[in-house]
Amino acid sequence: MTTRETTQSEQLYARAQELLPGGVNSPVRAFKSVGGTPRFIDRAEGAYLFDADGNQYIDYVLSWGPMVLGHTHPKVTEALETAIKRGTSYGAPTALENQLAELVIDVVPSIEMIRFVNSGTEACMSALRLARAYTGREKIIKFAGCYHGHADMLLVQAGSGVATFGLPDSPGVPSGTTGNTLVAPFNDLAAVEALFAQYPDQIAGAIVEPIAANMGFVMPEDGYLQGLRDLCHRHGALFILDEVMTGFRASVGGGQEAFGIDPDITCLGKVIGGGLPVGAYAGKRAIMEQVAPAGTMYQAGTLSGNPLAMTAGLATIQTLREPGLFDQIAAQTQKLAHGIAERARAAGIPIQAGHQGTMFGYYFLKSDGAVIRDYASAKEHAHTERYASYFHQMLDAGVYFAPSQFEAGFVSSAHDDTIIQQTLDAAERVMAAL
Ligand SMILES: *Cc1c(COP(=O)(O)O)cnc(C)c1O
């Protein structure tokens, strides 16, 4: 399957499968949907990953989004080197937490107050508890193919690994928990209106990814997000924007800035930790003041606001705000997305490609003219076999895209013109042979 040396990765994977379920600590890493041996990474630098056999890859996964400055950016590394000597965790408040809070409040338009947690999963789980506490209602609306982490009530028609593996709702999730989760198709306001009509005064809020980027890459249609927000407010429900992936990526201020949407609660993760484990839920002051100890909604964390994690997040977002930097990464992202679409068309391969800010995605389509706008059409039209073959040949050519058609891709400040051109040249060769 590969012309590259993979002996070390194969041996490590064999051993890992005896030690860890499936050999990994997060399912999509295992390459299940594309087959083959996952590469065990030894180190990373700039736009590159280096595996245990010494192979070098241009990285478009970037730890699934966080590494917007590339790997080992000197500003982040130096800040961490200084911070680590001051202790790694205190379990008491720090000035660093104020600083990152101030920065996020300044950057993300809707946010007035923030609570840091340790992952995107925790952020979304807590945001829903907050919406329920604030409204005194129990039901929530999510959208098919959107992924909000692995909390029980959100593991219903979820994206990411759940989409990749075509898993039904996971065993172990009690029906009592998901019984309050209502699911609507993405990009379909009428379906949401019907749910509000069916469950009057029972829906606490709707949670949505501004770009559905855990089922591939599906942009919101014109007016969709605003329409969703208006429907929520008309029915006394909160509008929750899950910006764990789009935060600091769709634009510096996230999808809400890119699309001009004012959510009640925002979920953050990935970039906010600059490669260390951080999540956050945040929003309007009156809502956030329900959170303990200001209010009565309980939520806590031994390592929350961890000084190393705050430091990495601060250094990353501060650097990202330097004049011109974000626009430069976004321009490279556009060059990549357009370039891939052009080369696919030249090779006669039907494709639907998208990009926004520093993130992108593309589907190989089973037929020309097919349009993907929600989870059902993604499952129907995405040519997953062709993607698997393309993925492996690109990997062979030294380009590391996500090992699944149903994941987005990411670009960093380390992806310069040469790297983008090398990627497009490889894509051209591979697509010609597909
Ligand atoms: C990655 C992701 C999550 C989950 O974050 P974790 O840090 O993996 O728990 C939640 N929502 C969205 C939109 C994500 O992309």
Image (cartoon, rainbow, N blue to C red):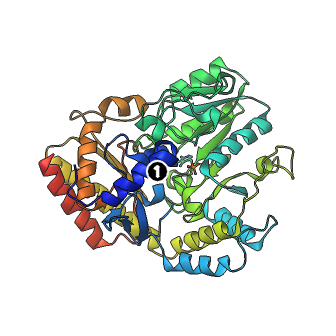
* Residue 228 rendering spot, x and y as whole percentages: 57, 36
- Is ligand 1 within 8 Å of the beta carbon of the residue shown at mark 1? no
Can residue 250 be seen in this snapshot?
no
Can residue 34 be seen in this snapshot?
yes
Q: Secondary structure at mark 1?
A: helix
* Residue 46 rendering spot, x and y as whole percentages: 41, 72
Residue under the point 75% across and 68% down: 98
Residue under the point 82% across and 43% down: 297
Position of residue 115 in the picture relative to residue 334 (left or right): right
Q: Is residue 102 above or below residue 400?
A: below
Instruction: Name the quadrant of the C terminus.
Output: top left
Q: Is residue 175 above or below residue 131?
A: above
**Residue 240 vs residue 69, the one in the foreground:** 69
**Residue 109 vs residue 393, the one in the foreground:** 393
Position of residue 151 in the picture relative to residue 433 (left or right): right
* Residue 341 rendering spot, x and y as whole percentages: 24, 51
Label 1 sits on residue: 16
Callout 1 environment at 10 Å: few (<14), some (14 to 19), or many (20+)? some
**Residue 10 vs residue 230, the one in the foreground:** 10
Position of residue 381 in the picture relative to residue 15 (left or right): left
* Number of disc labels: 1
* Residue 262 rendering spot, x and y as whole percentages: 62, 49
The amino acid type found where label 1 is placed reads Ala
Residue under the point 21% across and 56% down: 427
Residue under the point 82% across and 46% down: 290
